[in-house]
Amino acid sequence: MEGNEKASEQTSTTDGPMGAALRKLGLRPGQIVVEYGYDDDVEESVREAVEALVEGPLEDEDYDGVVDVVLLWWRDGDGDLTDELVDSLTTLEEGGSIVLLTPGTGRPDRVAAPDVQEACNTCSLSASGVVPVEGWVGQRLVGRR
């Protein structure tokens, strides 16, 4: 019964609203995802849903392989977003993407939309529309074609 409960929990995580939001951000089964910007304010349910959706663990900042997705938690005051995006691009497989998660409305460390756009322009990235994810705002960043 325990296995059925776990399978049911995974299905609800990947089939519910959060699973839909994460799929809009380009996450798929079988992808290797590295996580940057982890801190005690991240939403653990998002991390768990990503792991369930990609059917594997999130790799940490020490991972030195090539990845399909960079999951980047970013807050105002974390430094230079452009520099972080450039560094993130070096780990991506061709055709990979960055899932940028910034604090949602009402938080003092929210990142202004023009700051994200400027960093994307500098790095030749295109950003998708915003997707709300458990108090954070997600955007899929991909290289321009």
Image: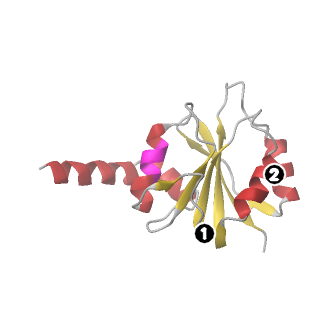
Q: Is residue 67 left or right of residue 11?
A: right
| Structural distance between the alpha carbons of marks 1 and 2 | 19 Å
Say few, some or many: other residues with alpha carbon within 10 Å of mark 1 (under 14 / 14 to 19 / 20 or more). some
Q: Is residue 121 left or right of residue 8?
A: right
What residue is drawn where x is 83% and y is 64%? 124
Please state which of residues 97 and 86 is positioned toward the viewer in this rendering. 86
What residue is drawn where x is 43% and y is 49%? 49
Magenta stretch bounds: 46-50
Q: Give the residue type at disc 2.
A: Asp
Residue where numbered disc 2 is placed: 83
For residue 17, say whether it is visible. Answer: no
Decide whether the magenta segment is chiefly helix, strand or loop.
Answer: helix
Residue where numbered disc 1 is placed: 66
Q: Is residue 91 magenta?
A: no
Q: Quadrant of the C terminus?
A: bottom right
For residue 20, say whether it is visible. Answer: yes
Q: Give the residue type at disc 1.
A: Val
Please state which of residues 122 and 12 is positioned toward the viewer in this rendering. 122
